[in-house]
Image (cartoon, grey):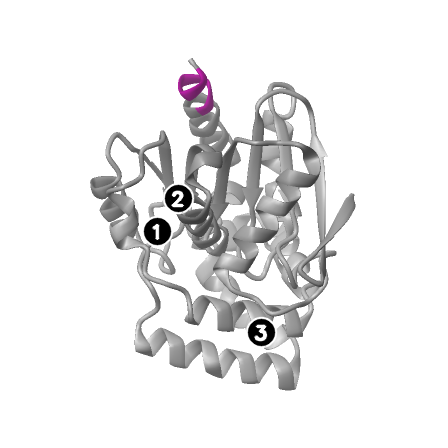
Amino acid sequence: MTSIHVDNVDIAYTEYGAGPAVVLLHGYPFNQTLWSGQVEALKNSYRVITPDLRGHGESTIGPASMNRMAADVASLLDALGIERVVIGGLSMGGYVTLAFYRLFPQRVHSLILADTRAQADTEENKRIRAQQVETLLSHGMKPIVDAMLPKLLHPETVSKRPNIVKQLRDMMLQTKPEGAAAALQAMAAREDQTELLSHIRVPTLILVGKDDPITPLQDSEKMHQLIEGSRLMVIENASHVSNLERPAEFNSAVMTFLNDSAA
């Protein structure tokens, strides 16, 4: 893992393999290790780059917004000498991916949107995020992790796959409370990107866990309807972190999409 300094923060990242560049952006409150299963599947054919978004993982904390995180990614690509990429993200990483497309459309070869949505937060969601910020800064990550885990994973995963539960819990507990709080505030303030969807002109893959309660299936169906020519993959027996719960199905869909998009 290495890092670059941009906009008064250090952005940590790792790159693997060689070939067309694929950037994968994790969600909140995770880090780049969320993508370990995808890295293994892709690195023999692609140059895979997994950053820690500001305030997460090994990256340092600074003022956060979806646009700022997108600009961090653009600066990272500049440092690596990469002009165009496949860019994808899960949950908050998907918000950053859409912001990146809006800001830097000429740099996007294709998009991967996983368990995410285009809409801005409702007033109720903003209120909940504000409460979570208070909890984080007063009591640390543990109460947030305990509350989030049942929503992030399918009940079958929780009951039968303790290794996945532990992996996700440990990842979340490693996140700095101040970085998580900044991300919550950034998500609450993010722009509605629904209007952007009909203007997307690159190949787009949308993936969603069928039982995702955080960004439900209908959100992905709406994106699929509005993004011309997009593909929608619904992953059975998966919740919000579908890439962790069902890596074989997730990776197969991504590899097929990448191979078809490159043809």
Q: Residue 211 — which label? A: 1
Foreground of the two, 68 or 216: 68
Disc 1/disc 2 C-alpha distance (Å): 7 Å
Q: Identify residue type, mark 2.
A: Asn
Determine which residue is flagged by label 3.
181
Q: Earlier in the sequence, mark 3 or mark 2?
A: 3
Query: Where residue 194 sits: x, y (%)?
Result: 27, 54
Work out whether residue 36 or residue 187 is closer to the camera in this orientation and state it. 187
Q: Vertical placement of 157 versus 207: above or below?
A: below
> Is residue 8 a member of the stretch shown in magenta?
no
Callout 3, which amino acid?
Ala
Sequence-wise first label, 1 or 2 = 1
**Left or right of 256, for residue 65:** right
Q: Earlier in the sequence, mark 1 or mark 3?
A: 3
Residue drawn at point x = 55 percent, y = 59 percent? 68
Q: Give, as a three-letter code, the residue at label 1.
A: Asp
Q: Residue furthest top?
A: 263
Q: Quadrant of residue 151?
A: bottom left
Judging by the rendered image, the residue that carries numbered circle 2 is 237
Figure quadrant of residue 127: bottom left
Majority secondary structure in the magenta region = helix
